[in-house]
Amino acid sequence: MLSLTRYQWLVLFAAWLGWGFDLFDSILFNFVAPNCVPTLLGLTIGSPEAKQATVFWTGILTSLLLIGWAVGGVLFGYVGDRIGRTRTMLLTILMYALGTAACAFAPNIWVLVACRLIASLGIGGEWAAGASMVAEVMPEEKRVEAGALLYTSAAFGTTLATFLNLQIAGHWFADQPEVSWRYIFLCGLIPAAVAFGVRLFVKEPERWQNVAQNAAPPRLAELFSPQLRRATLSGFLMALIALITWWSCNAFLPTFATGLAQTEAALQGLSREATVKLVENWKFTGTMAFNIGGLIGTLLTIPAAKLLGRKPMFAIYFACGAAAVFTTFGGDFEPHTRLYLYLAIGLSVFGVFGSFTYYLPELFPTRLRATGAGFCYNIGRVLAAAGPFVVGLLGSKVAGGEIGILFWIGVVPLLGLLLMPFVVETRGQRLRD
């Protein structure tokens, strides 16, 4: 990577920030849900009714986020092939930043839903533009490393969200949980600064400019042509398995940690403010374990993909993901220990996403790269949306029920192992023009 030019590093850094803040904005709701949902519904924070409503609405809003994400991913993937990667990144970053910040002013749950849907369109659209731009600017021999480094920003985004939530909800406004969540949503404006940086310093990749001048406009139907059908199926299936597992586990992590902490606080007879601080600290612990595992797992996709190939890499990550989920939610562990086990889930379930930033662009030619990568990475979210919805619906029926439901999410990556015959191997192939 030391051989990269200054401009190549700039492009990688711009895309890195864009994707990191993409994840930052996407998970803010997960942190504030235990305070946000009861406040908007007129329930007492921490009450049994509030806990059940939080699990239910976390499932609903996460599923709606994924559907909006899918629509935005497909739409802006197409737009990225039409108007360029840089312009599309600028547009999508502004959309998710403004949509997230608007959530801070929601007077009821329905306005919150509307603002999250607007943000989700931009969140879904940014990835394809950034991943395609990095793949097209990087030297062939550094594409895997650059793609994996690009995805390390996901751990940055989720970690930043974790720290800001702890600082705002756990310290500055620990005695005001009814309003702390609004200030956290306002932090969604931070990525807007990145958008202006992209506009000023990053230009369209030459590879895209050369092809765009002479090629016909992309059409979504081309992804299903005989030449590309198998590549599209391969990318879609791998992303679908990874998405269902990631969102089913991660969307409920703060709610899961909140329930464990509130039970522990009740046993210790802690005051209301002390309970709030314990809740935020336990949310921090679980999320940081997940993030650290995800960062390590992302970097490990580099040797796995280059030495073993893409197909064996997916098989290893899915097998480890199933084992991690079954162990975390099926074993008899102390509450705090169960939070630390999210490190193993992060290593596998989170880590596998480090491969999509280079694998999906490898499957498609330049004129269809953003369209194809955006479609494969995002359309599966429509089906993946069923995961959080089912967990939220069933988990809200009984106290602590999400643990038993999350255990069965381990079956999803096992199903991924059965799909290995459909995976297209791209190791050693040059990026197609």
Image: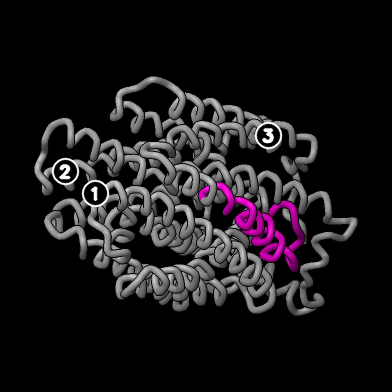
Q: Is residue 383 magenta?
A: yes
Quadrant containing the C terminus is: bottom right
Residues tagged 1 and 3 counted as in contact (Cβ below 8 A):
no
Can residue 160 be seen from the camera position used here? no
Give residue 263's position: percent from left, percent from top: 24, 35
Disc 2 target residue: 275
Give residue 347's position: percent from left, percent from top: 47, 34
Q: Residues within 10 Å of mark 3 (few under 14, many from 20)?
A: some
Q: Secondary structure at mark 3?
A: helix
Looking at the picture, tell me which residue is in the foreground, 161 or 192: 161
Q: Is residue 36 magenta?
A: no
- Would you place residue 212 above or below residue 155 in this image? below
Give the residue type that dot 2 points to.
Thr
Q: Secondary structure at mark 2?
A: helix
Looking at the picture, tell me which residue is in the foreground, 379 or 210: 379
Residues tagged 1 and 2 counted as in contact (Cβ below 8 A):
yes
Ranked by sequence position, the earlier of labels 1 and 3 is: 1
Give residue 353's position: percent from left, percent from top: 55, 45
Residue stretch rendered in magenta on the structure:
361-388
Ranked by sequence position, the earlier of labels 2 and 3 is: 2
Mark nearer the viewer, 1 or 2? 1
- Would you place residue 253 above or below residue 338 in this image? below
Disc 1 target residue: 46
Disc 3 target residue: 415
Mark nearer the viewer, 1 or 3? 1
Q: Residues within 10 Å of mark 1 (few under 14, many from 20)?
A: some
